[in-house]
Amino acid sequence: MLTKRIIACLDIKNGEVVKGIKFESLKSVGNAVELAIKYENDGIDELTFLDITATNEHRKTLISLVKDIAKNLRIPFTVGGGIKTIQDIEDLLEAGADKVSLNSTIVRNPEIISHAAKQFGSQAIVAAIDSKIINSTNKVFINAGKIETELVTEEWAKKVYDLGAGEILLTSMDHDGTKNGYPLELLKKISELVPLPLIASGGAGNMVHFLEAFSYANVDACLAASLFHYNEIQINELKKFLKLNNIEVRL
């Protein structure tokens, strides 16, 4: 049985870690480097760094901050935000990222997935999908949730797999920051439809929510932010709980 992963997310704005609800009302929660070191010491399996305003501010991800975090980490480190070109991907991987997370760019230019996967390997390319229910349909949003597209989430997930992405990071905008649980039905549908590692994001509020995502929706990883930022759940306690409930995790 493959080991399930717990991922901590650092949403970055103006160089600081922030957290909001449904992509709005962002509040500063701390220093990115300090939080990254803390999470690794606490036993997190991976870290995801998302420069959430880079695309809307028409700039690249903060390379210097990526370097500062990467040099302090031994665990896998994914970076996203403001990535537009193959050169941007190369720059981030050279700065210390193990994987890059692509959202708005791959919607506008899907073929960049194939080019990037060929050059850097599929394992380095994470397709990030921000999804929101519009008129009973799961729709894909870009530009940090500001722009609705015509893409249907389930169809887009299949498309990024066909193009060569190595992993999918699915964030439910409806659930983000609510602590009401992950979007289980959507996650289950995509995990059955697409043979790629699937990361659940948006809605974790307690340990049972992680268990539900792993056992019912069969995701490969669960990502959370505020729960860890505010010490509402201890990572080692979460892993012990999951292990007791027959979820294979790295202790």
Image (cartoon, grey):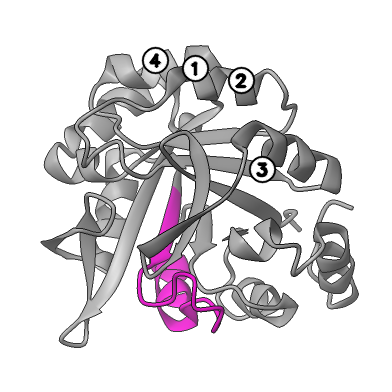
Can you identify the residue that label 4 sits on?
Answer: 90
Task: Give the mark, 4 or 3, whose residue is nearer the N terminus.
Answer: 3
Verify CB contact (< 8 Å) between mark 2 and mark 3.
no
* Left or right relative to 179: residue 229: right
* Left or right relative to 122: residue 227: right
Task: Give the mark, 2 or 4, whose residue is nearer the N terminus.
Answer: 2
Residue type highlighted by circle 2: Asp
Element under label 1? helix
Q: Residue at x 76, y 58 (%)?
A: 1
Does residue 57 appear in this view?
Answer: yes
* Left or right relative to 68: residue 191: left
Does residue 166 appear in this view?
Answer: no
Can you identify the residue that label 3 sits on?
Answer: 46
Q: How many residues crowd around disc 1 within 10 Å: few (fewer than 14), some, or many (20 or more)?
A: few
Of badges 2 and 4, nearer the viewer stands: 2
Q: Nearer the viewer, residue 203 or 232?
A: 232
Q: Residue at x 67, y 72 (%)?
A: 210
Q: Residue at x 62, y 42 (%)?
A: 47
Can you identify the residue that label 2 sits on?
Answer: 68
Verify CB contact (< 8 Å) between mark 3 and mark 1.
no
Verify CB contact (< 8 Å) between mark 2 and mark 4.
no
Residue type highlighted by circle 4: Glu
Gap in angstroms between the C-alphas marked 3 and 1: 20 Å
Vertically, is 32 above or below 85? below
Of badges 3 and 1, nearer the viewer stands: 1
